[in-house]
Every structure is written in structure tokens, then in C-alpha cells.
Amino acid sequence: MKQVINGADLRRMIVNAAASIEINKRSLNELNVFPVPDGDTGTNMSMTINAAAGDLRKAEDPNLEAASKIAASAMLRGARGNSGVILSLLFRGISKGLKGVETADGVLWARALQEGVDAAYKAVMKPAEGTILTVARLAAAKATEAARENNHIEFVQEAALEEAKIALANTVNQNPVLKKAGVVDAGGKGWVVAMEAMLLAMRGEDVAAPEAGEPVAATKESADFSDFDTEDITFSYCTEFIISRENDKDPEAFRAFLSQLGDSLVLVDDEEIIKVHVHTNDPGKALSEAVTYGSFVTVKIENMRLQHTEKVMSEQELAPKIAEPEKPLGVVSVCAGAGLADVFMNLGVDQIISGGQTMNPSTQDILEAVNKVPAETVFVLPNNKNIIMAAQQVDALTPKQVVVIGSKTVPQGVTAMLSFNPEGTVEENTQALTEALDSVDTMQITYAARNSDFDGYDIHEGDYLALYGSQLFGTSQDIKVLLKSLAEKVRDDGKEYITIYYGEDVKEKHAQKAADLFANICPNADVNLLSGGQPVYYYLISAE
């Protein structure tokens, strides 16, 4: 029985987990109760963890701490969907628990699993029982108990896995939707699959990745700072560094100290690090104060007058281009379809991320788009509930201020943009855009990806599905039946402005008939028809 693991072992464990989740991706996707085609749990978890597996394969003999950091960093940037973000946070906490050690025994591994649970719960505003969080929490608690009985890491992992399986089986009783459908939680199942694969790795058994299927998601590291404007140089030295947080000193006091030393100050912190960029004539004072907060991870000082970069403590990778601020506010929006992209661009959006249903963009995708916007503060419109958590991770990865508006549909995003004031303050726009979300009702028509008995509807693969907000509104083999029912609902609710975006699979003449139907049933409403070009959804309809 394996007693401890090192860096090579952890790499094997994560690569094994990635391969196993990839193999089980389809079955995890099919556990999603709601039959709408989407970038489902299995796909999101697979792409997230495969980002780490790809980076780990490239690493040369990483020690335990390095392997855990590589995995955590790659997963954070490659995280897709809520399940992917939670998976990345579990591994980020594990990395924190393995900090500064060369091998991990059962006690340390149990502690790392608990750190992962703490990190994931901290990120979720209202954690619900019967999810991946429940499975991970109970497994970590069992690991702690097992470590007191036997400190061999394999024994602890086996005990945690068995508890995770019990917890997973019980998710069907904890979530009313799962109970009605008679299935377990997909994210929880994914964590069980990962834990089982990691146990196999501890025993020296490899999981063979499938030869065919989706390519491994490639991610790359992004540096923490961009090139800042030095045209009018008042302070000579561009000073950049990252320090690990090793005490409870307030970073805001450090910000106040640095603001007295120079200009162009950017300070970003989380629970693990403080990142600083400042222009100053006395970098020594900045570094001397910094070390009172923790140890240096990286330092770079550049003499801007001489245009010469000097390595002080360790090398830092060149940062990707981050657009210098030319205005105070900018916007990034997620959508799929050329027509929808044109709508957002015409409303003032700076960058479009192609994605949504079936293709949730990663944190890295959103980060790259944010960094391209030449603004100090960038608003992000996810326009899909499964992208919001990935977007929320971006703020800690860029010197720009990032504000995520919780838009769950494209019509909500469009309505929010109508309230955007580029001359307003961050606070004013945050309030206006957020309040605008509740002023529009969203209707969607798509198809059933699989057979399902959901919310009283006997759904067959290929049926048309209508959604009103986040609720299933109706199902039929005749799309006209659903359009008529939606139009009557809009009329009865007294809506005055209706916009219909038709998808890439709908011909214009058929879309015009749908618009005419709404106009006839809702004679007091202004009905507009636009080509959205979106996949998956035949119609996206907004009503205000």
C-alpha cells in the first residue's frame, strides 16, 4: 500500500483523472436532467482538467508543490462552466494544502482535500446540498477520519472514494429535481470518477486516454501585468512583483504606502498572493515594505528611461499584450451567431467572445478578451448562467478591474447594453445594467437532445422545446404550436416590445411567419425581427 506521493505521482494522478473524465464525458453529460443541448457537465469538467494534464505533460520532473501549482493554474484559466470552475477550485485548494512539501502522506493529503473543499465553498454564494460540493465535502471529512486510523495515502484515498460514492448515491435524495428524474448529480459523479482514477494512479495503474474524441484543451499561462504607458516619464523605474501572503497585514495599507512612492499603481490580491505594479524612483523602498507581507515569488524592475529590463530575483515570462487604457469603461459580451454579435457591437460592446450553449468559453478565453479592451474597467456580459462563474475568476488574473453582470440570456445582455452609459461611473453602470436584467423576459425554442421525463413533460429526442425564462414552457412536434403559446403568454402579460432573433437553421421566410404570428396575436406590441444566426436555438425572443 502506497504511503506517500511525490510530484511525479501527483502528475500521474491528475493525468489519470483527466483521461477517466474524458472517457466518461458522455455519460456525465447524459446525467444532466434538463434535455436542452448544452456545454454539459462532462464536457466542461473534461476540458478543464485536460488543461492541467496538458501542462503537466510538458513539465520536466516537477516536485509535488510545482505539480500542484501547474495543475491549479492551468485549471483556473481553462475552467469552463460552473462544474469546471468548481473542479478548478478543488484543485486550487489542494495546491494550497501541498505548498512547501516534497511528499504527502495520508494526513497531509486529507488536509489538502479539505483545503479544496474550503476554496470551492467560498466561491459559491449559496451552496446547495446534493451537488459536487456535497460529495467533495463528505469525502474530505472521511479522509481526515481515515488518516487518524492509517497514515498511508492510499488508505486515505480509498476511504475518501468510498465515502464519495455513498454521498453521490444520496444526491438523488437531496435535490428535488434529481429525485424526480431518478439520477445522481453529474458534477458529483465527475468528482467520483476523478478520485477513482487518482486512486488507480497511486496503485500504479494508468487510465488510457481515448484515441478519438475532442482534442485536449490547450491553455497557456498569462503573466500578471501588461506594458504600461511610459511616454511621459516622471518616475524612472517600472517595478513589478508578486509576493505570497504569509500574514494578516492589510493589502490596502500597502496600497496607500505605494501610492505615496509613485504612480501607475496597480495592486491585485487574493488569499494567496499580492501582485503589484508601480512606477517609482525608489524601488528599494517598495521591495522593503513588500517583504513585510510575505516572500517574493517574482520581481522585475525596468529602467524606463534607458528602456532596459534587468532581472532582479527570478525570470518572468513575457506578458501577453494588454491594451493600455484609452477610456474608463469597456464591455465584453458572450454570444454565438454573427447577427447577435453585430447587435452587441452596434450597442457599444468592445469584444465579442463566441460561445454560449454547447461551447462555454473558458476563463482564459474571457481573460484574453478582457485584456484586449482598451479600458480601465471592463464589464463582462456572460449571457448564460453556465458561464458566470468562469467570468468571475477573471478579475484576479488581470490588472484591469473586471465587473461581471449576471446576465443569463442573450436578451438580458442586449437589454443591459441599452442601459450602458460610457460616461457614467462604474457604480452607476453596475447598478443600471444589473437592474435592467429583470426588465426583460426571455423565451427560447430549441430541440430535445435526448428522451426525458421532466417537470411533467414526456419529452422525446427531437421534439421542439419552448423555455420561458429558465422554466420549460412546453414541448411539441410542431414549432408553430409553441410559437402561438408563447405569443399568447406575451399578450396576456401586457408586453409592449418584442424582438425575435432567428437562428442559423431557420429560413428568413419562416422567421417572418413567426414574427407575423406574434404581431397578429399581440396587436398592441412593437414586434421586431432580426437574424441572430445562433446555433442550437431556433428562436430567441425578448419581451419588455
Image: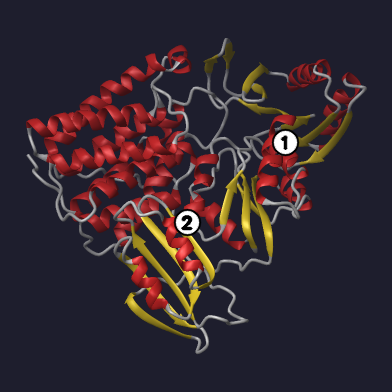
Residue 178 visible in the snapshot: yes
Q: Residue at x 53, y 53 (%)?
A: 365
Give how far across and how far down residue 86 sits, in percent: 41, 39
Left or right: residue 507 versus residue 47 is right
User: How far across and how far down the image is residue 214, in percent?
Assistant: 45, 46
In the rendered image, residue 15, in percent from the top left (x then y), is placed at 29, 48
SS at mark 2 in the image: helix
- Expressed as whole percent of the image width and height from the top left, the position of residue 248 reads 33, 51
Residue 366's place in the image compared with 461, above or below, is below
Relative depth, front residue between 3 and 216: 3
Reading the image, the residue beneath label 2 is: 397
* Tag 1: amino acid: Ala
**Disc 2 packing (10 Å; few <14; some 14–19; many ≥20):** many
Q: Is residue 215 visible?
A: no
Q: Amino acid at mark 2?
A: Leu
Residue tagged by mark 1?
A: 436
The residue closer to the viewer here, 468 or 118, is: 118
User: Label 2 vs label 1: CA separation?
Assistant: 28 Å
